[in-house]
Image: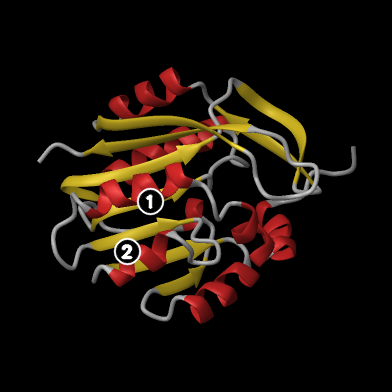
Amino acid sequence: MTRPETAAEVFDALGTAYEHAFRTATAQRAAITGLLGALPPQARVLDLGSGTGRPTAELLAAAGHDVTGYDVAAKMVEIARNQVPAARFELGDMRELSFEDRTWDAITAFFSMLQLPRAEQEAMIGRLAAWLKPGGLLVFATVPADVDGVDIVFMGHPVRAYSFATGVLKELLQAAGLEVVRAEEAEFVPDHAGAGPEPHVYLTARKPG
């Protein structure tokens, strides 16, 4: 296998092909719908790994929420700004972001930590918990697996993936002071040549208020 590509390299290359491949991920839309039903009016929402802006930022902004998305891939930020003008999108690595504690009503992170080493994922979950307002919600999705730096091919791109099993993820959220209020596991096959079924987990966790 060739050198694993960075997240910026992968998603700059994929662009809207990623949106197309995952457009039928009904469990993701269900998680967003659940979030929409729990948010206060005009909530401040941070979308980490915002991709093309669809479906997450688009659905949240259409419901009247104040959405700011960050992505590490410049191409994704460009696409999102064009597709979802009602939200704001910035280029940035989530590990380098800094916000005051209790800034956000909700934070979404859909499959955006899979290329972060486990220690960095655990640190990020703690930071996200701090950034949430009391009563705020984190919606976190990933491919649940006990893998610590496994080389795979994702949509034709070599990547190094890191993740945790679902039970461990729940423990990490709880250790960060969050209460898991919704969990859904699903199997999904991306619409892309050569893609096979992959497990997904969607966890919604609330910060006590």
Q: Residue 9: where, in percent of width, then height?
A: 73, 59
Q: Going by the image, does 184 lie left or right of 23? A: left
Q: Which residue, given by chain and number where applicable, does mark 1 sit on?
A: 108
Quarter of the image where the N terminus is located: top right
Residue 60: which disc?
2
| Secondary element at image label 2 | helix
Q: Residue 196: where, in percent of width, then height?
A: 72, 35
- Residue at x-position 56% and y-position 33%: 143
The three-letter amino acid code for the residue at tag 1 is Thr
> Which quadrant of the structure image shows residue 125?
top left
Q: Going by the image, does 6 lie left or right of 91? A: right
> Which quadrant of the structure image shows residue 209?
top left
Q: Residue 30: where, in percent of width, then height?
A: 36, 46
Disc 2, disc 1: CB below 8 Å?
yes
Q: Nearer the viewer, residue 23 or 45?
A: 23
Position of 143 relative to 106 (above/below): above
Estimate how packed mark 2 is, as few (under 14), some (14 to 19) or many (20 or more) residues with alpha carbons within 10 Å: many
